[in-house]
Amino acid sequence: GQGAGGQGQEKEREQGAAATSQVDKAAFCRELLVSGCVESFIDLFFILHRKAASAVPGQQSSKDSRGEVAGGEEELSLPEDALVFLRDTLEAAETERRHQAFKASYDNYNSVAEYFERGGDMRASQHFHERAMAVANQGKLLE
C-alpha cells in the first residue's frame, strides 16, 4: 500500500521542488550580475521575491475590499520559460541602453511591461513602461 510512506515521499518531492525553484531564481538573478547588468538583476530580484500578485498571464488573483491580493503570502512563482524571457529581455534592454541602441532598449522594456500587463500585474507593468519612457527620453525618441 501507499500509506503514510507515500505521503512522506510526496512531501519530500514538494520540498525538493520548492528548493529547486529557489535555486533557479538565484541562478537567473546571478546570471544577470555576471553579465554586468546590475539594474536588470535588481528588477528581476524584486520581481521574483515579492509576494504573488498574479504575474503569470492567464492566472487570476482574488482581491479583498481594499484591493489587496488575498492570501498573497507566497512568493511569486513563474514558469521557467517566463524566467528565461525576463532574464534575456532585461539583459538585452540594459545592454542596448548602455550601447545607446535606445529604440531596441525601449522595445525590450515595453515587451516586459506588456508581459506583466497580460498577466494583470499592473504594478510591474507600470514599472517597465516607466523604464521604457526613461530610455525614450534619454535617446530623444519622442522628439
Image (tube, helix red, strand yellow):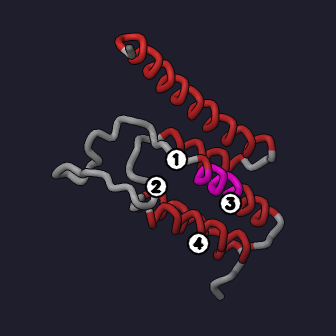
Give residue 89's mark.
3
The residue under label 2 is: 56
| Dot 2 or dot 1, earlier in sequence | 2
Mark 2: which amino acid?
A: Val
Looking at the rendered structure, the secondary structure element under dot 3 is: helix
Q: Nearer the viewer, mark 4 or mark 2?
A: 2
The boundaries of the magenta stretch are 81-90
| Dot 4 amino acid type | Met
Q: Which residue appears at 58% of the width and 70% of the height? A: 110
Magenta-colored stretch includes residue 59 = no
Residue at the spot of label 4: 133
Mark 1 or 4, closer to the camera: 1
Q: CA distance from mark 3 to mark 1?
A: 15 Å
- As measured in the structure, the alpha-carbon distance from the residue carrying label 2 to the one carrying label 1 is 7 Å
The kind of secondary structure the magenta stretch mainly shows is helix
Does residue 3 appear left or right of residue 100 in this picture?
Answer: left
Q: Could you say which disc has been placed on residue 87 in the image? A: none
First along the sequence among labels 3 and 1: 1
Instruction: Name the one closer to the observer, 29 or 54.
Output: 54
Residue depicted at 47% across the width and 17% down the height: 9
Name the residue tied to disc 1.
Answer: 78
**Element carrying mark 4:** helix
Would you identify the image quadrant in which residue 122 lies? bottom left
CB atoms of marks 1 and 4 within 8 Å: no
Q: Amino acid at mark 3?
A: Thr
